[in-house]
Amino acid sequence: MTQLDRTKTITFIILAGFIYSVILGIINTNKYDNYRILENGKFEHSIIRTDIGSYWRQAHKFKTDFEGGKNFFDSGTNYKDSYLYPKIIASYYMLVDKDIANLSGFMIVDNLKFGIPILNSLIFYLALIFFSKKLLLIFKKPAIIYYIIFFLSLEPTLTQYHSSYWSESLYLSLILIIFGLLLEPSKKISLNFLIGILIGLSFLQRSVSLYLIIPVTVYYFFQFKKSFFIPLISCILGNLIVVFFLGYTNYMQDQKFSVIPDDQKDGPYYLLAHGLNGETKEEKYKKRDVWIKENNINSRNKIDQKKILDYQNQYFKDALKNNFSSFVIIHLKKSIQAQILNPFFVNNAYKQDKTIKNYWEKNYHLYKYKIPYSLLIYFFCFLGFVKIILKNHHKRLLLLTFLFIIYYTGILGWVGWNRYMVPNLIFLSIFFGLGLNTFIEYIKSKK
């Protein structure tokens, strides 16, 4: 098979994934771009809610401020849960000359929302084309590359995000490019500087990348050995430029230079602190309310809001310090739980009503599909891993893959949500491709 034939096959697979993602995005937008009545009688938009609602409210504020005459740095809010994504949404709506929300703050329906999932899909599948070119340099067998690209193009746990409004798609695109650049590490200053910039941009998209430079540092150390310093410094400088840009933007908003997003200060408090202390959520919140009252805190005041975040952050740190062994146990249990693939997440989120008590129990029946499906995917990944170990090749690839998987599991495994583990599928795709190829070759050899 010629190089041209390989490229055509890869392009066909990627194009199929792109078309599927775009069509699904348009269908879901037409179906769910509406308001519904919740169990408690309130109205809620079926798409723009929870985390997505936060992104779009930030986008609306940025667009309103910017079009109202404020400069870029003064427009919008500081880094709460995603800095980059709300700016992209706002830019899109400025381009198509449509409003995001009305004067009352309610999200407008039928205002070309479908352009966002189309943009998400376009960026990801272009990134996948770039990644495929890197794979062609590593694997001699075309089938392995086809299986990897097929997985990344059409695996439903991944593709559901490209056709939706979550922040994962753009983040996965950035991680895919970073992964591709690191597959063939170079000592070139410019290339490593670019990798640092991309790591910084991924941090602007999702705060989990705050410490992503750490596994990259370890990788550089093993790959470049004594000459790792210059490539690493180049990468760190690229990353710092983005981080300092963020810090300056936050300074213009709050007159305080900071780079730690709000969700890193309140997430562990809301999700984990009470469990470590062996108390209920109500008891935890009661302590906070007492603290707010004793310190005359005004929760509507911007400065006092930061004080509340600092209180919550310190509360979690104290709980972690006093109950570290409990944290390790919780982390292990939740990390295992988070590995269960959930290709139904986005579709369920459109119909989810969090005002219903124990609303999550409604989807428990889906585990009879999720668990067998996860085991099947991990079976092929395990075969691929064994293949690499037995053949004793692709050591660099093995190291890089495991560093990233350990990083994401270590940083967010304790939450127990599969959505936070989705980046690992980018890296596991390599094992999947190798494993599926090994399995098919074995079946053919027995005929």
Image (cartoon, rainbow, N blue to C red):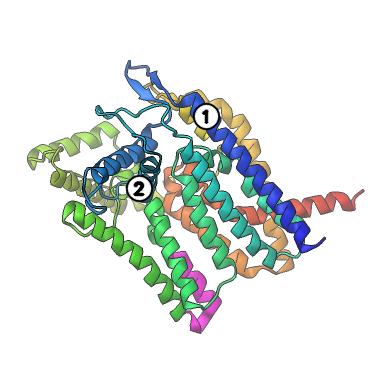
Residues shaded magenta? 212-229
Give the vertical position of 313 relative to 201 (above or below): above
Residue on which disc 1 sits: 28
Give whichever of discs 2 and 1 has the lower sequence position.
1
Taken as a whole, is the magenta stretch helix, strand or loop?
helix
* Residue density around tag 2, few if under 14, some if 14–19, many if 20 or more, within 10 Å: many
Write the residue at 62% across / 49% down. Answer: 152
Left or right of residue 387, residue 313 in this image:
left
- Label 2 sits on a secondary structure element that is helix
Write the residue at 20% across / 55% down. Answer: 252
Which is more toward the observer, 339 or 349? 349
Left or right of residue 424, residue 374 in this image:
right
Residue on which disc 2 sits: 87
* Residue density around tag 1, few if under 14, some if 14–19, many if 20 or more, within 10 Å: some
Report the quarter where the N terminus lies: bottom right
Left or right of residue 324, residue 388 in this image:
right
Q: Are marks 2 and 1 in contact (CB under 8 Å)?
A: no
Residue 19 falls in which quadrant of the image? top right
Q: Does the stretch in magenta take in 228? A: yes
Give the vertical position of 346 relative to 221 (above or below): above
Q: CA distance from mark 2 to mark 1?
A: 23 Å
Q: Position of residue 223 (x, y in %)?
A: 55, 75
Q: Does the stretch in magenta take in 322? A: no
- Label 1 sits on a secondary structure element that is helix
Write the residue at 83% across / 54% down. Answer: 441
Q: Position of residue 43 (x, y in %)?
A: 34, 20
Residue 277 falls in which quadrant of the image? top left
Tell me the amino acid under the disc marked 1. Answer: Asn
Which is more toward the observer, 34 or 296? 34
Write the residue at 23% across / 35% down. Answer: 285
